[in-house]
Amino acid sequence: MCRLNAKHLSKLEFPKVLDRLAAHASFSAGEEQARSLTVATDLQEIRWRLETTSEARTLLDAKPETSIGGAHDIRPLVEAAQRGAVLPPPELLDVRDTLVAARMLHRTLSRLKGQFPHLAHLADRIQLCPEIIAEVDRCLDERGNVRDDASPELARIRREARIAHDRIQDKLQSIIQSPRNTPFLQEILITQREGRYVIPLKADFKGRIRGISHDVSASGATIFVEPLSVVELNNTWRELQLQEQQEVNRILAHLSAQIAARAIEIEQTVEALAELDLVFAKAKYAEATDATAPTIVPFQPAARPGRQENQPENTGHSSSTIRLIGARHPLLDPQQVVPIDVVLDKETQVLVITGPNTGGKTVSLKTVGLLTVMAQAGLHLPVEQGSALSPFENVYADIGDEQSIEQNLSTFSAHLTNIISFLDQADGRSLVLLDELGAGTDPAEGSALARSLLNHFRHRGTTVFVATHYPELKSYAQLTPGVRNACVEFDPETLGPTYKLTIGLPGRSNAFAIARRLGLSRNVVESARQMVSSGELRTEDMLTDIHRLRIQTAQARDEANAARAEAEKLARDLRQRLGAIDEERQEILDQAREEATTELEGLRAEVRTLRRRLQAAAAPLEALSAVDEAAAALADEMEDTTREPEPRQLLISPDVPQRPIRAGDTVWVHPLNAKGQVLDTDGKEAEVQVGPARTRVDLDALELRISAPPSPREEGLGEGVTSFRAAPSPGTRLDLRGCTVEEAIERLDRHLDAASLAALPWVHVIHGKGTGALRRAVRDFVGDHPLVSTYKAGGDKEGGEGVTIAKLVQA
């Protein structure tokens, strides 16, 4: 349960934070929840609130369209319906819109329950009330008009009213269009007066058209007359209008009664929506302030300081955790506020902050207190990661001018009265913030009273932050266990505060430095220095040296950090450049490989074309010599190609010995990719018969296939020779389904070549049935192919017309 006093929360400006939080709410109920947000003290409750805010930030980041939608605070409307009031259509639509928004949000969060359990838990309180949504949609359109089919009676009344209206219009049109009546009319039009249709008659012709006068124009020149012939028609139309209004009121009353019957569920839904809206507002406010979630840690047992005489005994003293890193006051300009680090170790219970006026002491106190209560309210804090706080059960603040003219109290008396109000209530789980403790009275007495009050809080185990000008408190903090000095820094060069908080060092007065900077005579300043005790001067000089060394250390650290960051940046840039160079090199290699592959495929295609022409040619030898030269040139180009994606191995009979090629041998001609018969050799070249043509080929381009009959001097040389391995088999099945005709023919040609090299007897070409285009192209191609002897369709168990079996020519 929250025990924090509203007066102390106001001194910390917590209501102003809540006003900024409410600005991020989507509807009035959410704003009300934001402005009345309480501060929790239970550890688990605080953690639950912070985790819920974190879930909302994650959800809005992943799904920014998530919102409360068109929700309204409809609780007053529901209460009115419970009292028997008939809600008008706009208010009924507000109820419908709120229930629709609740249903959409419930569906979203229920679907994401595993990822956002806290939000889903809040959404489980939503009551859907689908029958109210359906009934309002059935009876009202989006403009709030009651639909004709809202009830059968309303549909009948409106149908008859339209008929009656048309009859009136027809009758009046006949009157004003009649040439006999035209001279008497001011204008040829039909208008309304008092809900009845009339025509404008010139005042000079009053009585020319018999009827009832309903109105006269401002000038008196026109009389608005309801002709007697349409009186009964107008009466009928008006009666139907009254019946229509009665039926509409009955329908609206029916809808209002339905809402009143589900009043408890609807109010519970609005409250659930308001809580979800508050959570979403916390998430949006956290994003706006660049906040992070602090860690909430329990109080830790701590050693009790020695008890002094006349001091109350501290029972249950425990150590609090306050670790605020890069803390910023949330109400100050984020572009100008200076972050501070407030980190108390386990031994520190009281922090004494000293320094010049306007140096930031009060802001530091408010920052600590305000961020503490914000965290316990479930708000993320404008701090860096790693910040942590304990859940204080009380936060007391004595900050600001407490002077009260009405109570005739001085500043000192007002401050002391406020401190007395919580003096005996503050305990080991309380946070006390004291600004200018003991000020407003005699310095010696005020200083002594301040030290006594701090001893009182210290022995009760209270965590205390105090801002003071008393130099005696610096020594007190230095010599008292559990008390530590801190200061807000001041730049003597600019005469301005830096607003930075330094823990561990007391503040300096800087009075002499400020006086000199403002132009006070050196003699006056030196005279003043001589009036100060040498001990105090040595203390000030020592503090100045310590601050100077600290600044130098900080500068050295910053320079080291900057140098390290620069080195890391250079290393990253170098790695990126090396990576880019490696990628570029790989791209060049891949491109060169692709170009080589493309050129190789082109060369192979030209060789296959030449081979077919050689095998099928019947031309004179003169024509074949040109083909021979072209084949030789292509062979040279293929020899220059350094890499080939899939090099082929020629089929060499294992029984053929390795020896020089001679006339009569059957050989495989590499450039032509065909078999031939050696006719003659001259040591470097051989004349080869390939089909009906002859050509001369380098001996290095020939592979022995079948030996010629051995000459007598060569008999007996066949033993002990090395055999060559057969070419790899591409398989007897080739599946061309899904290929275009061009792709299929190219793959089939390569497969037949490889199958012939592997000495396969046949190839099963699977092309499917389809439209038959691919089948016809395959069979036309294999019918003309020199390596195919015959072909046929597959059998019933082999695929039928979807397969072509090509039988290969055997060597």
Image: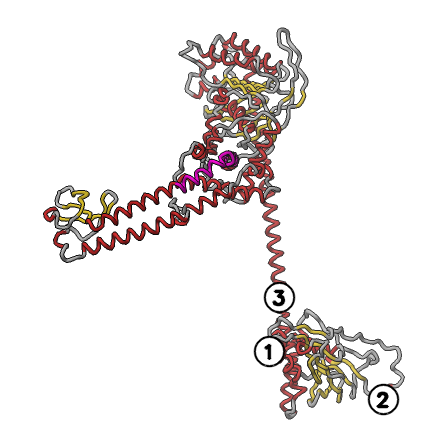
Query: Is 734 drawn above or below residue 459 in the view shown?
Result: below
Q: Quadrant of residue 804?
A: bottom right
Is residue 246 found left or right of 82 in the rendered image? left
Q: CA distance from mark 2 to mark 1?
A: 55 Å
In the image, residue 456 lies at what x, y percent? 59, 12
Picture disc at residue 711: 2
| Labels 2, 1: front one | 1
Q: What residue span does the magenta drawing correspond to?
A: 250-279
Q: Amino acid at mark 2?
A: Ser
Asked if residue 485 can be seen in this view, the reply is no
Seen at 40% across and 37% down, the residue is: 86
| Labels 3, 1: front one | 1
Seen at 28% across and 51% down, the residue is: 165
Sort mark 2 into few (<14), some (14-19) or many (20+) by Cα contacts within 10 Å.
few
Picture disc at residue 773: 1
- Residues tagged 2 and 1 counted as in contact (Cβ below 8 A): no
Q: Main secondary structure of the magenta part?
A: helix
- Residues tagged 2 and 3 counted as in contact (Cβ below 8 A): no
Mark 3 or mark 1: name the one nearer the start of the chain. Answer: 3
Q: Quadrant of residue 654?
A: bottom right
* Residue at the spot of label 3: 592
Q: CA distance from mark 2 to mark 3?
A: 50 Å
Classify the position of the C terminus by image quarter: bottom right
Membership of 228 in magenta stretch: no
Asked if residue 730 can be seen in this view, the reply is yes
Sort mark 3 into few (<14), some (14-19) or many (20+) by Cα contacts within 10 Å.
few
Query: Is 561 drawn above or below residue 657 in the view shown?
Result: above
Is residue 133 found left or right of 572 in the rendered image? left
